Amino acid sequence: MELRRIDDCVWEIPPSAKPGMRVPARLYASEALLAGMDQGVFEQVTNVACLPGIVRAAFCMPDGHWGYGFPIGGVAAFRADTGVISPGGIGFDINCGMRLLRTHLTEAEVRPRLRELVAGLFAAVPAGVGARGFVRCTRAEFRRVMVEGARWCVEEGYGWPEDLDRIEGRGALAGADPDAVSERAVERGHNQLGTLGSGNHYLEIQVVPPDGIHDPTTAAAFGITGPGQVVIMLHCGSRGFGHQIGTDYLRAFVGAMARHGIVVRDRELACAPFRSPEGQAYFGAMNAAANTAFANRQVITHRVREVMGRVFGADPRALGLEVVYDVCHNTAKLERHRVDGETLELVVHRKGATRAFGPGAPDLPAAYRAVGQPVIIGGSMETGSALLVGTAHAMEETFGSTAHGAGRTMSRHEAKRRVSGAALLRDLEARGIVVQAASQSGVAEEAGFAYKDLAAVVDVLDRVGLSRKVATFVPIGNVKG
Amino acid sequence: MGRYRILEDVAIADCALALEGDTLDDLFATAARALAELMVDPATLPSDAARTITLEAPALDLLLHDWLAELIFLKDRDAAIFPCADVRITGDGPFGLRAAVRGGTIDPARTALRADAKAVTFHQLGVERTAEGWRARVVIDI
């Protein structure tokens, strides 16, 4: 497949590369990261470029890898008036996302109680297959969760009012429609609020390392004060509720495409016109799932505050346990962007990608409006994570989007062949990282060597200007599903 | 008895399964076993759960999708995993499925957990007849 180098770390596959491509495919990667991308990435990003109503380009971020339908790390925007919405372009784990909490604590203060803290968090936040959440809500209340998201949690006492300012969309995306959600989705997921899940989901205690501040001014604006500071990072999504909504609608869209005269290269890209009844119903259900994911991260935040307050014998407010930000990975959002000199209403799909709005953009809290949106990039439990900030360039080029993590380079099976969960846990312990996991095999699947070099991914984002490096964090404790 | 293997170079963050069965019934029973073994160690499940599942779909690949999606649904709604299935598939389009499934409810103190299957994807989904029997490919979102 023809691949043109547009810039140092920008590559483009022209529309002539595959019949049906409406726009080019654009990939952001260093030569090394590009060489490590599997063939599926190139097939999938060019398949996305064939979808009706797509504008500018189908994008793949430097953490991109072979997914199902869209590549993971994929971004695509479709005209709201003539384009489509695709459940496969969002993923089953709707609004899987990241939340970062800061603290006033230092590593020196946390280390003596680290084991107790990890055990407390593991006990308080159910994880793994079949886990039930600690929040009990009636069906009527769950309908409120679908619409009000994190706001419902705060009203019920699970959080602080100011938390809402630091969540993408203030923790409640508009357009959620509980009537578009199946009874099966409610049955499947209503008892999972407050659960972590499994796979690459985690709750991590991290520290700013000695060389971890890259942009002191922006870091200070985000409350990241300097080396030694302890932060908490959370990665989870909408659990079985969102998974079932994705399942229901993808199945329906596969059948509905013929009616709309749409042909796709991979049925996982099944889609419907955004303005069609099917498209609008899915958008309403997807927003309901997104809001439950915000609620899930909010009630887990509440649990984190309870546990840390108990372990450190202090009020969580005195510990400075404030939300830095909460970002979505898997969503389609209705946004207005400039395309070829015209402001268009677009359905921006981000699949394993993060919104990265620059300074002055809408939806940013007042405290961040001048600097831009915090972008939380999760790494592996061994290697650390990063905090970046959105840029004006991302707004112009990728509809305000950037990468979401390190990106896998190895199958889960191969990772388990290379290391056992028990051996990896012992190794992490020896390196000062305390881990409690619901699944030992799950620990092996998430070994650091199964992922790309996070620093290389972040470096590309910084070099191409899709987001700027602010700070990095290294793990000292981890709770895994 | 059917066989399955994991395709490691397909959708690396998820789990691509290549399934084989002597008969169509065997293929679908093998798919249930593969899904269960992906999520837990079946030897650590209690034997306390059984269900009857009936489904209908216009094509075999859609039936396989719906079959596995149903088992994933039960995993979350009832915390139950079903490694054993007696499956009977009838018709030639639409296809019917009737299955008696047996397994257990996840016991957090005893059950060895593996990966939490989120959904059945349509990526590379297919069912076909071979000289030896039947085979299928399916990618499970992890």
Image: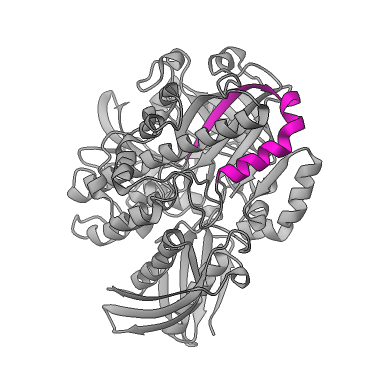
Colouring of the image: one colour
Q: Which quarter of the figure has residue A212?
A: top right
Q: Name, please, the residue furthest toward the right.
A: A430
Which is nearer the eye, B85 or A215? B85
**Residue A447 in view here:** yes
Which is nearer the eye, A16 or A235? A235
Q: Residue at x 45, y 53 (%)?
A: A43
User: In screen coordinates, is A125 left or right of A17?
Assistant: right
Q: Main secondary structure of the magenta part?
A: helix
**In the image, residue A114 lies at what x, y percent?**
72, 35
Q: Count the numbered circles shown.
A: 0
Q: Residue at x 49, y 52 (%)?
A: A132
**In the image, residue A138 lies at what x, y percent?**
33, 47
Q: Which residues are magenta?
A: A97-125
Judge whether A107 appears above or below A143 on screen: above
Which is nearer the eye, A348 or B41? B41
Q: Which quarter of the figure has residue A14?
A: top left
Which is nearer the eye, A48 or A219? A219
* Magenta stretch: includes residue A123: yes
**In the image, residue A351 lies at what x, y percent?**
43, 43
Judge whether A427 appears above or below A464 on screen: below
Q: Residue at x 55, y 43 (%)?
A: A125
**In the image, residue A22 lies at what x, y percent?**
32, 44
**Residue A354 in view here:** no
* Magenta stretch: includes residue A444: no
